[in-house]
Amino acid sequence: MKTINGEVVKSLREALSLTQEEFAEEIAVSVRTLYRIENNKSHVDVFQYMDMLSIFEKPLEDFFLLFLDNKAYQVYKEFREYYNRYVRNYQFAEFLDNMAKLKDSAFINSPYIQQILAFAENGKKTYLRKKNAEVHQDAHSHFNLEDLQELTEALSITMKHFDESKVADYLLTAFEVDLINNIIIALSNVKEHESAVSLAKELIGNKTLIATKLMNKYDILSMSAQEVLGYSYYQAKMYHDALDVFLKCYRDRLKTNSLNFVVILLPVIAECYKHIGEEEFFYKSLMVRAYYCSILHGYDHFIDELKQSTREIFNAELEDWIEYMPDDVCKTIA
């Protein structure tokens, strides 16, 4: 595969008026690595450079005419389409089926792609397990020890010497953040609660996440890390801490109009209120609000889960709460 001359990378950085430190932060490499790239002591392949252009929202059309033949560019375009359509929607089986069409491309052998494929293989298995479970499970309760090992191995493809105590100092890609979030959830699932909470706190303090949050107050990576911390507290039965985190996440999601996440957060906030002994009206009103939000935005698949969790967690029927709840119930939590 063709590689990119260091001067090309340096020209891109200078065109963006970024220092080496700023540019390295954006593309999730160390300053030392960027220095080596710009001085042709380390190489960037064509696809890595195209990802750089995507990060900075630079057009790719002219670039591929210079560096790629038409077939190689089509492979890259197909991968991006499959990733955006399937991985972001947790449709891992569909993603893997489509990626199999690209198996003869050298592109598949890059560490970046191998990591995504490993993550998708685990996701396909765990989400199928959750779907086939006979009892209700919350959105994250589907990892076991084998999954934890697989996720850790997937992370090691790009981070060979990952040290949990140094997470705050790592430059992370968005996908590596997702992987670490899943490792934290897996730790909680196998009852390694102290490790899960500790790693979640480290991730929130990561310099990449801090930098992205400074650029965007409601950055999706920072919010997802916060939600995983709340989940870790909840699984450790630290309900007051979990409630504080989830309420903040809920308000942040409202401000960004992320209604699918709002609907998911409402039931777990309700559970926290129940566990800390709050009045029944608080968790009733939240479950009813989640129900109406699901109807309003067409989340039909979530309504059955709400009804089932109301029976199992609150020993009640959601229909009864809906029937007797005051009309202004959805104004309870601002």
Image: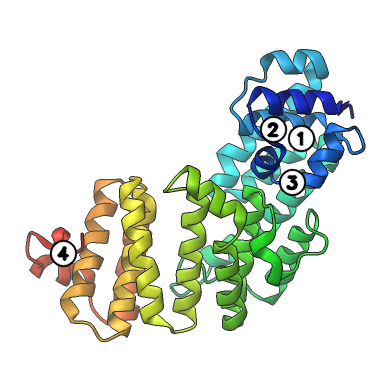
User: Which is more N-terminal, label 4 or label 2?
Assistant: 2
Label 4 Cα neighbours within 10 Å, binned few <14 / some 14-19 / many ≥20:
few
Distance, label 2 to label 3, CA atoms, is 11 Å
Q: Nearer the viewer, residue 230 or 33?
A: 33
User: Which is more N-terminal, label 3 or label 4?
Assistant: 3
In the rendered structure, which amino acid carries the disc numbered 3? Val
Distance, label 4 to label 3, CA atoms, is 45 Å
Residue in view at x 64 percent, y 63 percent: 168
- Residue at the disc numbered 4: 332
In the rendered structure, which amino acid carries the disc numbered 2? Met
Q: Secondary structure at mark 2?
A: helix
Residue in view at x 64 percent, y 67 percent: 183
Q: Secondary structure at mark 1?
A: helix
User: Which is more N-terminal, label 4 or label 1?
Assistant: 1
Residue in view at x 69 percent, y 76 percent: 145
- Residue at the disc numbered 2: 52
- Residue at the disc numbered 3: 29
Residue 316 visible in this rendered orientation of the protein: yes
Q: Secondary structure at mark 3?
A: loop
